[in-house]
Amino acid sequence: MSSVLAIAASGMHAAQLRLESSAHNTANLNTPGFHRQQVQQQAAAAPGGVQAHIAQAPQAGVALEGEAVEQIAASYAFKANALVLRSTQSMLGSLLDLHA
């Protein structure tokens, strides 16, 4: 079960980075020559999950509608991973109750 917790925690971290990056892009929307930030993700080795880091996009400019969609998607990804953590905690609690 610890690998499930690690995977969900890494997913929450990646979603948080996506939300922070998108908020940064939105705040700098009107800054001349601003290059938007983007989060790059890749599968992590054992115990699993995702590795995420912020990189600078090659083109200048920010599309506000794209950032709004990114913020919504990051929010849903965070909530989904939080639900996995909550479900895992509930299952572990039930398992301990059975063996106690």
Image (cartoon, helix red, strand yellow):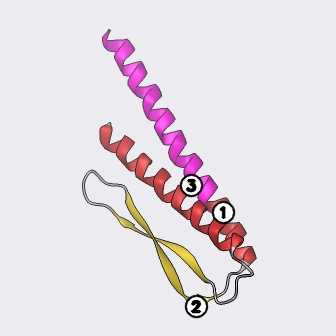
Q: Residues within 10 Å of mark 3 (few under 14, many from 20)?
A: some
Mark 3 is on which residue type? Ala
Residue 19 image point, x, y percent: 60, 61
Please name which of the two marks, 2 or 3, marks the residue nearer to the observer: 2
Q: Secondary structure at mark 3?
A: helix
Residue at image location 55% in from the left, 64% down from the top: 18
Residue 67 picture quarter: bottom right
Question: Do tag 1 and tag 2 residues touch (Cβ < 8 Å)?
Answer: no
Which numbered tag is attached to residue 71?
A: 1
Cα distance, mark 2 to mark 3? 26 Å
Residue where numbered disc 3 is placed: 77
Region of the chain picked out in magenta, as a range:
74-100
Residue 66 image point, x, y percent: 69, 75
Residue at image location 38% in from the left, 49% down from the top: 7
Q: Tag 3 or tag 2, which sits nearer the N-term?
A: 2
Cα distance, mark 1 to mark 2? 20 Å
Q: Residue furthest top?
A: 100
Q: Secondary structure at mark 1?
A: helix
Q: Residues within 10 Å of mark 1 (few under 14, many from 20)?
A: many
Task: Name the image quarter holding the N terminus.
Answer: top left
Image height check: is 56 above or below 10? Answer: below
Image height check: is 44 above or below 33? Answer: above
Residue where numbered disc 2 is placed: 59
